[in-house]
Amino acid sequence: MAAEARFYGTGKRKDAVARVWVQSGSGKITINGKDAAEYLSRVGLVAMVEQPLVLTGTRDRLDVVADASGGGIAGQAGAVRHGIAKALVAMDAAYRAVLGPSGLLTRDQRVKERKHAGRHRARRGKQFSKR
């Protein structure tokens, strides 16, 4: 990897989209200008974002800068994880063999189902009363 090379990946999850850049550094993860732990505020979400870096053994060698928008915090965390995985593959194609079987390169296509007519939500029917 070159001295100042930056690698890019776009991650998506639900309604969230994350633009992610990976470069050599000390292991700092920044999302929307804040530290990942501060922005995500849940330990599980921080661990989820770090998963591609841990699997490839690059947790302490790479800095991540992400710009996430849309959706909620959990969706944005999933989008950042997807973007990191794609950026790592752009950096080194050998990481595909590690990240692919773990399902980190696959876009999770599940999104909220639309509300249907005659129902309270997508599938919740009207309240039933016998009398």
Image (tube, helix red, strand yellow):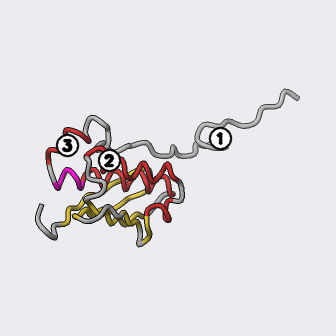
* Towards the viewer: 12 or 87: 87
Q: Earlier in the sequence, mark 1 or mark 2?
A: 2
Q: Are marks 1 and 2 in contact (CB under 8 Å)?
A: no
Q: Is 16 located above or below residue 129 in the figure?
A: below
Q: Are marks 3 and 2 in contact (CB under 8 Å)?
A: no
At 43% from the left edge and 49% from the top edge, which residue is drawn? 47
Horizontal arrangement in the rendering, residue 73 relative to residue 6 (left or right):
right
Please give the residue where the numbered disc 1 appears in the rendered image.
Answer: 119
Spatial distance from mark 3 to mark 1, Cα to Cα? 44 Å
Q: Main secondary structure of the magenta part?
A: helix
Residue under pointer 2:
54
Q: Quadrant of residue 20?
A: bottom left
Amino acid on which disc 3 is placed: Arg
Q: Is residue 98 magenta?
A: no
User: Which residue is depicted at the point 20% across and 43% down?
Assistant: 96
Find residue 13 and report its horizontal and vertical position in percent.
40, 50
Furthest residue in direction bottom, as rendered = 33
